[in-house]
Image (spheres, helix red, strand yellow):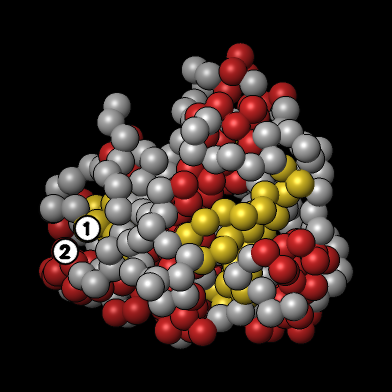
Amino acid sequence: METTLRVGILGGSGYTGVELLRILAGHPRAEVTVVTSRQAAGQPVADMFPSLRGWVDLEFEEPDTDRLAEGCDLVFCGVPHGVAMHQVPALLDRGVRVVDLSADFRIADRAVYEEWYKETHAAPAWLERAVYGLPEVNTPAIRDAALVANPGCYPTAVQLAFLPLLEAGVISREGMIADAKSGASGGGREAKTHLLLAEASDSMSAYGVAGHRHLPEIEQGLSRAAGESVALTFVPHLAPMIRGIHADCYALLDGEAGAGLQDLFEARFGGSPFVDVMPEGSHPGTRSVRGSNFCRLAVHRPRGGRQVVVLSVIDNLVKGAAGQAVQNMNLMFGLPEEAGLDTPPMQP
């Protein structure tokens, strides 16, 4: 008889939390046993998220390490960066495996983390042991990990676009650009003026051009793929939509290396269930991945020149957050990688 995996969500009242609950409600082997929220403790989950009525019969609870450790085999940590590093170690010390969706364990270099996030890391020992949870790169390490650092949304879309090119050594390490757009849900569920409908609708604007916190995470992954330091120009934008990331990724080819780009991408991701390399000439839209764990990629070489352009689209709340976290959970517990995630995108 197959056992049921007991799952907790630490910090479940945000968009990532409701997306985890939605996905896990249909998971064949996992059951959510605890959902915490300091602000919503005692409130039924379905009252806050009516979409889960009839699917989730739980109340939000106060965060309690003993309760989570006793009732869960794995905990998804959905609290903000700067908070997770104080709460995660106590769970790990009790033998609970963790997928952390904050940024606290993504950047391996403590000094780099502290430079970008402006605070001293409270759990450097676990920072060194954490496994970066991009399944298309780190599957073997994820399977054995106690702590998986779930990648950020922009870093997922951008890294998947550049990985085949860097691993094959066919592009210059200089002049790489990622021009990316995200829906407003990427800013979280808290009330923020720039995310109000009247502010975000009918407009698109760049932000973080001088340096976005996702940049060191992206450069870390790309440098590992290249086997040497890689510098990237990364420009994120807020787009007038709710969900989705569209990343246009540019690089210069070395010599005549571009002849087999389509084959290169298809071979690289042939065994990856959630990366879809589109046919030549395709222009995938964010709607084509909405509500799904897919990343769709299309590789172009305009006019046959040195410039290569990779288009990468994901749902920022699924492959960019909750879906990828469940994908990591599946790997950690020897479950089919697609479990709970093998559903088509929503259209329209």
Q: Left of 98 or right of it: where is 276?
A: left
Judge depth for marks 1 and 2 and give the one in front.
1
In the rendered image, residue 268, in percent from the top left (x then y), is placed at 25, 73
Could you classify mark 2 by the number of other residues whose Cα lies within 10 Å: few (under 14), some (14-19), or many (20 or more)?
some
Q: In this figure, which residue is indicated by the disc labeled 1? A: 277
Does 89 appear above or below 315?
A: below
Does 328 appear above or below 49?
A: below
In the rendered image, residue 317, in percent from the top left (x then y), is placed at 50, 45
Amino acid type assigned to the residue bearing label 2 in the image: Gln
Looking at the image, which residue is at 28% across and 68% down? 272
Q: Quadrant of residue 299?
A: bottom left
In the rendered image, residue 45, in percent from the top left (x then y), is placed at 64, 36
- Residue in front for this viewpoint, 314 or 217: 314
Q: In this figure, which residue is indicated by the disc labeled 2? A: 262
Q: Kindly indicate whether the residue at mark 2 contacts the one at mark 1 (C-beta within 8 angstroms).
A: yes
In the rendered image, residue 236, in percent from the top left (x then y), is placed at 54, 45
User: Which element carries disc 2, helix, strand or loop?
Assistant: helix
Query: Mark 1 and mark 2: span between their CA atoms?
Result: 8 Å
Does 323 appear above or below 147?
A: above
Q: In which quarter of the image is residue 103?
A: bottom right
Looking at the image, which residue is at 48% across and 51% down? 24
- Residue in front for this viewpoint, 309 or 245: 245
Is residue 14 visible in the rendered structure shown here? Answer: no
